[in-house]
Amino acid sequence: MTEAGKVVRIGGASGALNDSAIAVPGLLKVEGLNYLAFDYLGEGAMGIFRRMKQADPRSGFLPDFVDIHIGPYLTELKARGIRVTANAGGMNPEGLAEMIRQRGREQGLTLRVATVTGDDVEHLVPQLRAEGLRDMYSGAPLPEGEIGMHAYIGAFGIARALDAGADVVITGRVVDSALILGPLIHEFGWGPDDLDLLAAGTVAGHLLECGAQATGGTFTDWQDVPDWANIGFPVGECHADGSVVMTKTDGTGGLVSVGTIAEQLLYEVGDPRAYIVPDVVCDFTGIMLEQVGPDRVLVRGAKGYPAPETLKLCGTYEDGWRSVALIPVSGIDAVAKARRTAEALLERVSAMLEERGWGPWRQSHVEVIGTETAWGPRAQALEPREVLLKIVVDHANPAACILFGREQTTAIMNMAVGTSIAPIIAAPRAFPLTGMFFGLIDRRRVTQAVALDGVALDYADPVVPGFDPAALPPIEGEAAVMDGELVEVPLIRLAWARSGDKGRLFNVAVIARDPAFLPWIRASLTVAAVTDWYRHLFDAPAHARVERFEVPGVHAINFLAHDAQGGGINLSPRFDAAAKSMAQHLLEMPVRVPASLI
């Protein structure tokens, strides 16, 4: 088959280390499947893997990848020539690679397993600290003490391993989309100068690496998505020209539509003109989506710029201890009883800390779940008869958190009538917190290595950087034109939306259901209006900052809210630490549109 007619089918088999066991058996029903790609490394996962490796040097990864995701299917994968890419190696890619080889031997298989490493740059931390490296978001210096440090590396190392004949490629901290771009580089022979193609492959990777989020998971119009129980995971039918048809396994649940794909396209994106990965800088603004059949969406139109001179760094470090109380309270005056319970428990244990000389809480946080606490000034006046009291306390001393964890269980006996107890009592009364640091490092200081079955392969990163932010064109949105009587409707009538966290910030992408709606959405969703809508959620409300970006190809606007995540997903004490509900908040915002338009 010529390159022009060649189709490479890649299944997105995991969006996180805890993704569903139904993914692989469902994807194996796809005829002509070539690859399975597994994204295991959300930012917080590296902290988990680092603790595991400190406890046992042979660890540093989750055996689940073998036991649940690929181990039961190795014979079929090998027989059909389906190859696997995964960043499940965490802190010990070679350890996981050997586990896969051993599982293969137990099944009578000879599996060629490669590793891509070099992302671990913890050895550079003393130099980086001496050089004054600052967090790219907060400007804070590197914290003192031990810190794990990993650079996000790219796709060409994965391609090299596949060129050498690897059945499975295990990596550490590669950028998520590289797990798909690497196979496409290998299959189509794309080079480091094929910038538009590398950008297109990155788009395919971005759509596939979050699993069923592209096939109806977390979709705005959730009622339209059938059969969550058997949801199909995404398949990308990738072509040499960079275009991809996004689909899923026939006969599975879920939905692949312009809406589901547009939402995933802009998930966790900042400036859509410059989605930066190690191999290329991608411009998403001209991407076009077309429904070309049931559960089939054609994606094309990405543009690429040269790669950046720097690579992103992610540092993880121990940042104290936390205890969380979840206390059910029911009956008359449930909300008032819950609030008094929180006050009493914090007062009691704070006094005990003072008696012991342990110092005050670093942070305490109270939410009465069921009373719309996250909605701030827009919360409805509710008086539910059953609520869940959540109390979070942080302290440098684990003993303080253990003490609180014990005392909170006494509320069932000491405090409000109607108080019960939640299964959280069986969980640890104190658990460690992982702090996150994000920075930039000159890519020349990161040396990647590729090995096949433990034997090093010749490899040097071929990427030639040269990104110039000044090359990004300004994009202005079309203004609304007054046309007759205006009526006010909630945004959800006019748009889909999705949100997600990226450390201390979150994004919300708003995609017009009809291009004609976009100018009116833009007119109501000004930066000032959106900032005010979210103001109560910012870490410093008086200094709230929101950016707005246009995405004309998919008729969308992307908002970026800075310093609004309570410390990020690992540290935030809030009900929604992952910022998944921020789009839900915005979808209630009123938009003025011509009555004739709707």
Image: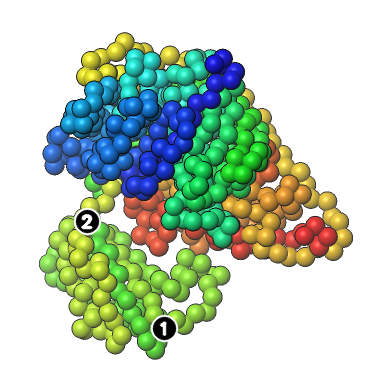
Outermost residue toward the top in this view: 458
What residue lies at 20% left-to-right and 83% top-to-bottom? 413
Q: Give the distance between the C-alpha atoms of the residues marked 2 and 1, in whole angstroms.
A: 31 Å
Q: Amino acid at mark 2?
A: Phe
Residue 172 higher or lower than 46, as above or below = above
Give the quadrant of residue 283: top right
Q: Residues within 10 Å of mark 2 (few under 14, many from 20)?
A: some
Q: Amino acid at mark 1?
A: Arg
Give percent across and percent down for residue 363: 31, 61
Residue labelled with disc 2: 431
What residue lies at 64% left-to-right and 41% top-to-bottom? 293
Side (left or right) of 565 relative to 421: right
Q: Quadrant of the N terminus?
A: top right
Q: Is residue 247 visible?
A: yes
Q: Residues within 10 Å of mark 1 (few under 14, many from 20)?
A: some
| Upstream in sequence: badge 2 or badge 1 | 1
Q: Is residue 202 visible?
A: no
Q: Nearer the viewer, mark 2 or mark 1?
A: 1
Where disc 1 sits, the SS reads: loop
Q: Are marks 2 and 1 in contact (CB under 8 Å)?
A: no
Side (left or right) of 211 relative to 114: right
Give percent across and percent down for residue 30: 46, 36
What residue lies at 14% left-to-right and 61% top-to-bottom? 399
Give percent across and percent down for residue 184: 48, 23
Q: Nearer the viewer, residue 177 or 484?
A: 177
Give percent across and percent down for residue 242: 57, 25
Where disc 2 sits, the SS reads: strand
Residue labelled with disc 1: 385
Residue 526 higher or lower than 316, as above or below = below
Q: Nearer the viewer, residue 537 or 232?
A: 232
